[in-house]
Amino acid sequence: MKNVKDNEKCVVIFDWFTLGMELDRGIKEYQALGFQMISTKRFVARHNVACLALTQLNREGIDDETSGVIAGSDRMGWFCSNFCIFKSKTPEEIAEDNDARANKKLVPILMRHGAGLELGDYINYEFDGSTAKIVERRTRNQTHSLKNNEGFITENVEPITA
């Protein structure tokens, strides 16, 4: 926790929305999650701060990459501005992308701001769990556009630098 002065920029981060005593009062799970989402949106709007909220995926999230994989309630998807899935790449995806360092991917699903990506595209990330370091790399489509006719990348595939 930190006290933030009026002129400081900050971001609110929720590890994820959870259910608590609301269910003991007869409120349905989807209603409780909806109330939390509405309260959070009102808070960040009132205080003009950014918010990053994480949620769990349901079992379909193992293989599927749609808004239907949000665990708990569809309301989580209804109220978010952008919904992306951050997950490990399959061995097949790593081989297809020909970049063993890019072991995670960020798949934009709902984008209410910005252009988003083409269907089937994702952002590659290099994740080192021992140091908790995440490095953004090229998108899937950018990486595939660098391949020659034999399927080999013809250009150095280095991390994206800001």
Image (spheres, helix red, strand yellow):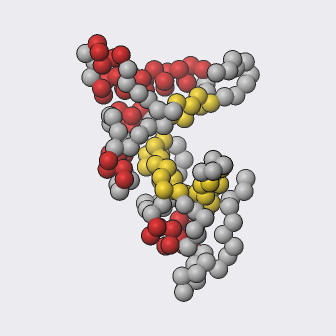
x 54%, y 35%: residue: 52
Nearest the eye: 30 or 141: 30
Left or right of 109: which side holds 154? Answer: right
Relative image position of residue 25 (x, y in whole percent): 28, 13
x 46%, y 67%: residue: 91
Nearest the eye: 78 or 60: 60
x 72%, y 56%: residue: 161
Quarter residue 24 falls in = top left
In this orientation, does residue 75 appear? yes
Quarter residue 75 falls in = top left
Relative image position of residue 144 (x, y in whole percent): 54, 72
Left or right of 66: which side holds 140? Answer: right
Image quadrant containing the N terminus: top right
In this orientation, does residue 117 appear? no
Residue 56, compared with residue 105, is above or below; it is above
Relative image position of residue 122 (x, y in whole percent): 50, 58
